[in-house]
Image (cartoon, rainbow, N blue to C red):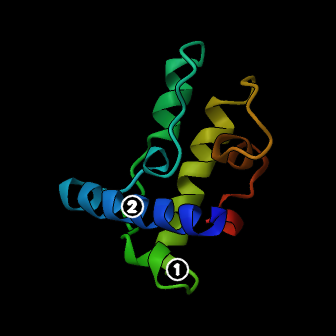
Amino acid sequence: MTGQSTRRWLQLSFLLMAGSASAGSLKLSDFESISDKSFPETCVQAYDTPLSQCTPKDFTDGKACSAACKDSVQQAQGFIQASCGDVSASSESLLSRGQKGNLVAVL
């Protein structure tokens, strides 16, 4: 039952991402929000950098995302590394993975 619940949650997440993409570019917060109010505003802004070359299709077809999308993710990752260096985040979070330079591999 857990597998079905996870699958259903992912499907709903992709639907929400599609709605977000039609309203504007995808952001990391469309996948996983950061809600800690103690994070510096510059870090939150870096995390919310639009992934301007990414579409929901980059994450839903079961294939690797496009080269242009990877470039957008790497750009956001650079902003995260520059702005969130002193922030402590869960090792499994997208923020932590961005700090370590692992975002493209994760997404």
Secondary element type, mark 1: helix
Counting other residues with Cα less than 10 Å from the Cα at mark 1, is it few (<14), some (14-19), or many (20 or more)? Answer: few
Quadrant where the image shows the C terminus: bottom right
The residue nearer to you, when weighing 59 against 83, is 59
Q: Residue at x 58, y 62 (%)?
A: 6
Where residue 59 sits: x, y (%)? 48, 73
Residue hosting label 2: 12
The amino acid type of the residue labelled 2 equals Leu
**Residue ranking furthest to the front:** 1
Whole-percent x and y of residue 104?
A: 65, 65
- Above or below, 63 against 104 in this view is below
Q: Residue at x 48, y 59 (%)?
A: 9
Residue 64 in which image quadrant: bottom right
Mark nearer the viewer, 2 or 1: 2
Query: Is 93 displayed left or right of 20 in the figure?
Result: right
> Which residue appears at 19% of the width and 54% of the height?
23
Query: Looking at the rendering, in which quadrant would you find the N terminus?
Result: bottom right
Q: Residue at x 46, y 43 (%)?
A: 29
Name above or below for residue 101 compared with residue 84.
below
Front one among 93 and 11: 11
Q: Is residue 39 above or below residue 79?
A: above
Q: Are marks 2 and 1 in contact (CB under 8 Å)?
A: no
Q: Position of residue 98 (x, y in %)?
A: 68, 48
Disc 2 crowd rating (10 Å Cα; few below 14, some 14-19, many 20+) is few
Q: Which structural element holds mark 2?
A: helix
- Choose the circle earlier in sequence order: 2 or 1: 2
Q: Which mark is residue 67?
A: 1
Could you say where residue 70 lies in the image, as x and y percent from the top left?
Answer: 55, 70
Left or right: 83, with 45 as reference point: right
Q: CA distance from mark 2 to mark 1?
A: 26 Å
